[in-house]
Amino acid sequence: QVQLVESGGGLVQAGGSLRLSCATSTTIFSISAMGWYRQAPGKQREWVASITSRAMTYYADSVKGRFTISRDNAKNTVYLQMNSLKPEDTAVYYCKAHNPVTTYDYWGQGTQVTVSS
């Protein structure tokens, strides 16, 4: 059973920073594409950033230049460094792992990020 556990969320003032972590239990982490998504109250879940097994990164326009996704294959962990946070970044942030063998997606339980103005 694949498990993803996010951590690092919290309350921060606008302009501040947070670092989210997503630890996985999967032994295939090193070949899995990983992603961060977020869902604000009353809105649909949206993609934030992705990192491939070869560490190629992609970002939504809304976070480009402010957020950085990275991975540590030795720790089976993916990170999201969030700088220059804005109130509109407030959301529950979810981690997703994409298994390239089964093409199945696994999700974490989410971590709350709240940015005050």
Image (spheres, rainbow, N blue to C red):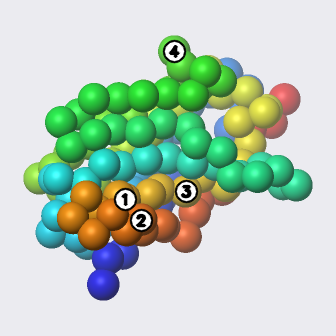
Residue with the mark numbered 3: 94
Q: Which amino acid does label 3 sit on?
A: Tyr
Disc 2/disc 1 C-alpha distance (Å): 6 Å
Disc 2/disc 4 C-alpha distance (Å): 27 Å
Q: What residue type is labelled 2?
A: Asp
Label 2 or label 1, whichever comes before in sequence order: 1
Residue with the mark numbered 4: 65
| Residue drawn at 41 percent across, 39 percent down | 50
Q: Which residue lies furthest to the right in this view?
A: 42
Q: Is residue 102 above or below residue 12?
A: below
Disc 3/disc 4 C-alpha distance (Å): 20 Å
Residue with the mark numbered 1: 97
Q: How many labels does the image show?
A: 4
| Residue drawn at 27 percent across, 29 percent down | 56
**Whether residue 93 can be seen here:** yes
The residue lying toward the viewer, choosing from 110 and 11, is: 110
**Whether residue 76 can be seen here:** no
Label 2 or label 4, whichever comes before in sequence order: 4
* Number of the front mark, 3 or 2: 2
* Number of the front mark, 2 or 1: 2
